[in-house]
Image (cartoon, rainbow, N blue to C red):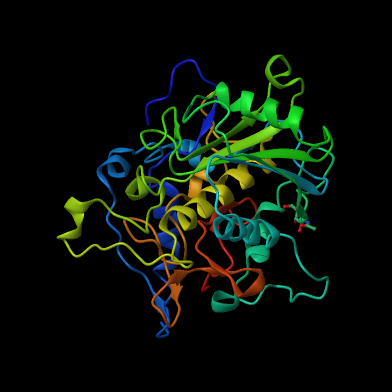
Amino acid sequence: MTMLPLTFLLFLSISTTTAAAKTSQTTTTTTTLELKKNYYNPKVAAPEALAASKRFEGSSNLVKLKYHMGPVLSSPIKIYLIWYGNWPNPKKLLIKDFLLSISSSSTTEPKPPIKNHAATVSDWWRTVSLYTDQTGANISRTVLIAGEYSDRKYSLGTQLTRLTVQQVIANSVKSAPFPVDHKNGVYLILTSEDVAMQDFCRAVCGFHYFTFPSMVGYTLPYAWVGNSGRQCPEVCAYPFAVPAYMKGGGMGAVAPPNGDVGVDGMISVIGHELAELSSNPLVNAWYAGEDPTAPTEIGDLCEGLYGTGGGGGYMGQVMRDGKGRTYNMNGRRGRKFLVQWIWNPVIKACSGPNALD
Ligand SMILES: *[C@@H]1O[C@H](CO)[C@@H](O)[C@H](O)[C@H]1NC(C)=O
């Protein structure tokens, strides 16, 4: 992936054929998988943009995920949500249900987690919570929504840049009753499908970084994720959409778990960014590679991988409900989600709650 000049922004690379996925495939194909009816492992077309991006292929960075001595989010994580643009309530509720599914709901949950079809979002975050800082503190397993702000009037227009998005945060801090939460706060800016962002669809589907005192008044971690539904679902809501030219080869898209290609696609990107934000909030904690301006983080290593046996164009073993909708984990209120796996520092491979081995 070509690195973007002038930025320090961490981007969600859009490669799907990562070497990590390959590694995982190598280790899992030796296991004989007893496939139940409700499991399947569709081959999903890699769009041109994805196929062309071989950022990690053959890269030794993969196995060199390192801790660089900085903090991780070890206190309960308080998310301040900024809804930018037009956000109907059902879409907001879907995203909030995902975020609120992350915290472990009870202390009596089974350990180790129940595998595959009973996998939960909270089990998925368990992998993230394996990362620690130099004091030995783990990333928190508690994630809360601490405040919400709606920027319905598109205060900075419908074309945002990496700098103006910080202005959106500054406006929300000014006009909303957000406390400035230095200990636990992170901002999550979500833009509606009619909002363009610099490099959206070409190089990024989401990114995380931290705010600058000169722009916002404070240094706080934030992430941006856009709804790609109208702009580039085949890139950023993959595998719920594939490019038209690939469909002839029998490589169809899979049905999104909540029937909303754009928002269901955002949820995996939000998961990716939150995992990285928590393990590398100030870009000096967990990443691979020597260059902090182009770090490879714990979500990057597992992009496109959603289950056992994934890699090389396969998303891995996932589940399908009675209506044919695809998912790999359960959330609160009966919700289902499809979220990519995360690099596990203990087993040194991608892992997720729906693993079959
Ligand atoms: C904290 O991280 C360590 C190292 O990865 C892990 O062994 C331990 O289980 C984690 N503890 C919790 C409570 O997640």
Left or right relative to 124: residue 231: left
Q: Give the residue drawn at x 51%, y 48%.
A: 269
The residue positioned farthest toward the front in the image shown: 153
| Residue 308 image point, x, y percent | 46, 67
Q: Give the residue drawn at x 36%, y 49%.
A: 233
Q: Nearer the viewer, residue 72 or 178?
A: 178
The residue positioned farthest toward the bottom in the image shown: 37
Left or right relative to 214: residue 301: left
Q: Give the residue drawn at x 42%, y 85%.
A: 36
Q: Nearer the viewer, residue 357 or 55?
A: 55
Left or right relative to 157: residue 108: right
Q: Give the residue drawn at x 42%, y 72%.
A: 325
Residue 163 appears in which quarter of the rendering?
top right
Q: Quadrant of ligand 1?
A: bottom right
Identify whether 188 is placed above or below 210. below
Q: Is residue 106 visible?
A: yes
Residue 4 appears in which quarter of the rendering?
top left
